[in-house]
């Protein structure tokens, strides 16, 4: 089984080499797709270096900053693996956990797998209370609309069979991608049946705003709108 790892990049010059080393170290056949969303730091030159050093890395560039969702849309279109996973370019999520995230798909139990920072008893860095509360509220609101029982809708680690994600048109350009994709996979059918969605507990080493965290309260407001837009207004 081949894995396509889609990594949106925006001003991650300090972490991009480290995360690529971690991804490459995972003993899985993989394609790595790096989408630079018009970084203003030295990320672009570092991505060019990585592409020259590794045959399995493909680098794509946006000529203007469009957001995480737009970068993922670009990356998904280029994916060639059997399974596609989203990986942030910082060091908050651990690629060593790919094998356990892949297991439900490898055993033909799942079509889509969500990681969860709030399930499974894995370690996580203690950080912002209000962020945690906000994530849980958004997950609850999303679950009410989709009738799924996820514990972490906003998580980065989402895996899809390639034929699933490439049938979905991603419309959101920023962090609204998370509730959008959750709504769309909840309604999608395969052979007339709902997609099989699994959740796997993961560890999490969140970063502070001083360390480069980008999501803010406006993204939370947008997420509420997206939950309504893609569940009620469609």
Image: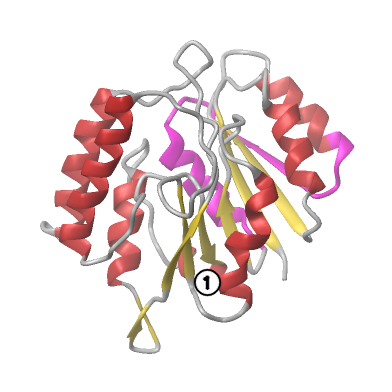
Residue drawn at point x = 22 percent, y = 63 percent: 146
Quarter of the C terminus within the rendering: bottom left
In-front residue for pair 199/50:
199
For the magenta stretch, what is the residue range?
Answer: 52-80
* Residue 90 occupies quadrant: top right
- Residue 21 is left or right of residue 193, and the answer is right
Measured from the top left, where is residue 193 in percent x and y? 34, 86
Residue drawn at point x = 68 percent, y = 15 percent: 42
Colour mapping used in the image: secondary structure
The outermost residue toward the left is 233
The outermost residue toward the right is 53
The outermost residue toward the bottom is 191
Residue drawn at point x = 88 percent, y = 36 percent: 53
Quarter of the N terminus within the rendering: bottom right
- Residue located beneath label 1 in the image: 163
Measured from the top left, where is residue 109 in percent x and y? 52, 79
Membership of 68 in magenta stretch: yes
Count neighbours of disc 1 (C-alpha within 10 A) and say few if under 14, some if 14 to 19, many if 20 or more.
Answer: some
Membership of 54 in magenta stretch: yes
User: Can you say whether 217 is above or below 30 in the image?
Assistant: above
Measured from the top left, where is residue 170 in percent x and y? 38, 52
Measured from the top left, where is residue 232 in percent x and y? 11, 58
Query: What secondary structure is found at the residue carrying circle 1?
Result: helix
């Amino acid at each position: 089984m081949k894995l396509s790892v889609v990594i949106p990049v925006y001003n991650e010059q300090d972490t991009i080499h480290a995360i690529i080393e971690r991804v490459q170290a995972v003993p899985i056949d993989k394609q790595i797709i790096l989408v630079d969303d018009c970084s203003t730091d030295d990320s672009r030159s570092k991505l060019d270096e990585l592409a020259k050093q590794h045959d399995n890395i493909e680098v794509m560039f946006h000529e203007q900053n469009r957001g995480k969702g737009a970068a993922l849309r670009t990356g998904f279109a280029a994916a060639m693996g059997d399974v596609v996973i989203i990986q942030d370019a910082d060091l908050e999520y651990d690629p060593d956990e790919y094998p356990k995230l892949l297991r439900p798909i490898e055993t033909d139990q799942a079509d889509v797998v969500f990681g969860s920072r709030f399930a499974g008893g894995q370690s996580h860095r203690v950080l912002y209370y209000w962020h945690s509360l906000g994530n849980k509220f958004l997950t609850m609101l999303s679950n009410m609309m989709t009738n799924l029982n996820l514990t972490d809708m906003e998580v980065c680690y989402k895996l899809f069979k390639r034929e699933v994600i490439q049938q979905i048109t991603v419309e959101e350009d920023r962090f609204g991608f998370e509730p959008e994709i959750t709504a769309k996979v909840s309604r999608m059918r395969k052979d007339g049946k709902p997609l099989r969605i699994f959740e796997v507990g993961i560890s999490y080493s969140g970063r502070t705003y001083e360390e480069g965290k980008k999501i803010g309260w406006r993204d939370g407001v947008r997420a509420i709108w997206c939950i309504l837009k893609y569940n009620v207004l469609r």
